[in-house]
Amino acid sequence: MKELHQRLLKLHGKPYGVYKSFQGQYFSFGDFTLKFTHIQGDPHAQPSRIMLSAKTASLGFPEELHCNPEKEMALADFLLRQFTETPENIGIVKAHCQIMLRNSMCIENGIVRMLASVNLPGEGRRIEGDKASELLIGTLSDWVTKAMYWNNLDKEKCEAHMQCLANRNFLLSQLAEKKLAAFVPNNAILPRESGVSEAPMQSAVPFISPPELLAHLSLPNGEQIAGMGIPCGVTVIAGGGFHGKSTLLHALEEAVYPHIPGDGRELIVIDQSATPIKTEEGRVVNGTDISSLVRELPLQGSTKCFTTKNASGATSQATNLLEALELGASTILIDEDASAVNFLIRDLRMRELINSKREPLIPLTDRIRELASKGINFIIVAGACGDYLSLADTVIAFTEYKAECLTERAKNITKHICEIAPPLKNFKQNRSVNTEILQSGLQPSSPIEKNIKIKVAAGQISIGKLKIDLRKFPTFCHQELQRGIAEILYNFIKENNGGNLKEYFELFYGKLPENEANDLALPRVMELGAAFLRIGWQLPSGDC
């Protein structure tokens, strides 16, 4: 600290650019080591970035709190949430309701690392060394001490946070044995305060399982927890508008990531490959085989290597489904309200008017039982598409946020009439990709820029000249998750020499890139692969 203080005072009054002399340098900061990872160019530029690292033992943390990757992630997530108040000119990323692997606060091999932003003081174009010293040595030190020393933390709250993740993962491990696609515990709070809030609704009706679907799973301590088990197969969630069916589906969508205690959904678990499939009109498609859902197109011919820069609603949803299966999804989530009608159904009268020779789309109703027989689960919210009732293994209905099982009643409803479509063969595409053509896009996006820049803003990613549009992406995608996707894809494209798409992503998955200048979170293979397949660039494919 003393060395940093003296150097800052010596810089007082010098040109602001002299701050750059700190770039990449380390300073002793008590129990921490401080590193300047990025220095801003002027007082009004993006703030500078610093990394603080320390041994967990020196901060007083018992080894049993971080003795495996699960505990490391839970403890790091808890520590990040202790920075509830941020002083002026200092900032750290805000943690959302998910427990995730982030680089903004991580623990590995007994070392905790934290990334923060600091707006270095300057008057005009001159360094204010005295204020910089006060900010970095006084304010920053107090801020970190309060939030990162074991003796200063609420120990019971910390242990509850870590136990919450352990409980959730233990419940998750029991799904396959119980032949369940998902589990929703009794008394879970599904609704949120508003469409822009992650907080649970205070006056919400707690979820209670219908007796017919009641399941019991165990917690690590042996305690039994009761709730609704959604069996593998085809499940339809029905009900009137605003009665809670889409609220349940949204909770299941988000359950692929763990949630914090008090969220209300922290013990909901679902098959970790679960992927929502929605219409995404206008998306880029690069060489995807959609022939199992879309026959030959007029004037375009075969759909075994479908490529477009502007997909329609139905073709985009068909593509989304088949790409998700290619990437390993075994549970598909569909909301009728966010789907193309002609992707979901074609009623009897329309079939009589327009026969299959004139209609290239094969509706999901004609394929869903065959896909289910191959181990694919579907959870579908349907308020108007009654054809799915006779195709379902399980039917759950919602009335005023109360669930009941109507499977037996649904069986008595007239069966769905479908056409005999050609049998599914290799419906999971096994494409090989070679990123050589994409590598030509890894260059500055304009003559003014000297380096390849990765930019993330409002669901749009650019990696040099490569563009990815995630604005209609069906899975929630926070800024740091989008940045994580962008950084991993950059490394993937730069280093990849070709091979099976799914295998390569599994190889790259599991660890965040080393990037001290930006906040990153680790995506699933499903989000990573989906973003890659939306790159606005022509991809080669084995079938093309």
Image (spheres, rainbow, N blue to C red):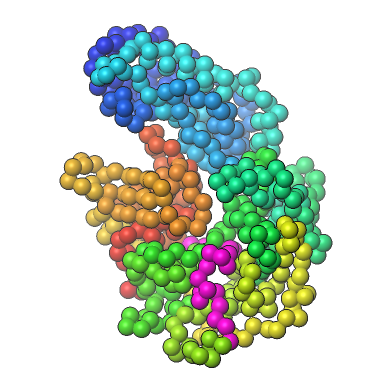
Residue 236 at x, y = what percent? 66, 69
On screen, residue 267 above or below 60: below
Q: Residue furthest left?
A: 447
Q: Quadrant of the C terminus?
A: bottom left
In-front residue for pair 338/296: 338
Query: Looking at the image, which residue is at 48% across and 42% down?
Result: 521
Residue 217 at x, y = what percent? 76, 53
Query: Looking at the image, which residue is at 46% across and 72% down?
Result: 314
On screen, residue 82 above or below 101: above
Residue 479 at x, y = what percent? 45, 44
Instruction: Judge from the rendering whether residue 489 lies leftward or rightward of residue 243; answer left or right.
Output: left
Place residue 73 in its image quadrant. Answer: top right
In-front residue for pair 439/214: 214
On screen, residue 7 above or below 224: above
Q: Quadrant of the N terminus?
A: top left
In-front residue for pair 36/89: 89
Q: Is residue 326 magenta?
A: yes
Query: Looking at the image, which residue is at 48% across and 66% down?
Result: 279
Instruction: Judge from the rendering whether residue 403 lies leftward or rightward of residue 247; answer left or right.
Output: right
In-front residue for pair 368/73: 368
| Residue 292 visible to the viewer | no
Q: Is residue 3 magenta?
A: no
Query: Looking at the image, which residue is at 47% across and 30% down?
Result: 92
| Residue 448 visible to the viewer | yes
Instruction: Judge from the rendering whether residue 480 lies leftward or rightward of residue 383; answer left or right.
Output: left
Residue stretch in magenta: 325-348
Tally of marks: 0
Q: Residue furthest front?
A: 241
Instruction: Judge from the rendering whether residue 75 lies leftward or rightward of residue 440; answer left or right.
Output: right
On screen, residue 23 above or below 271: above
Residue 513 at x, y = what percent? 41, 42
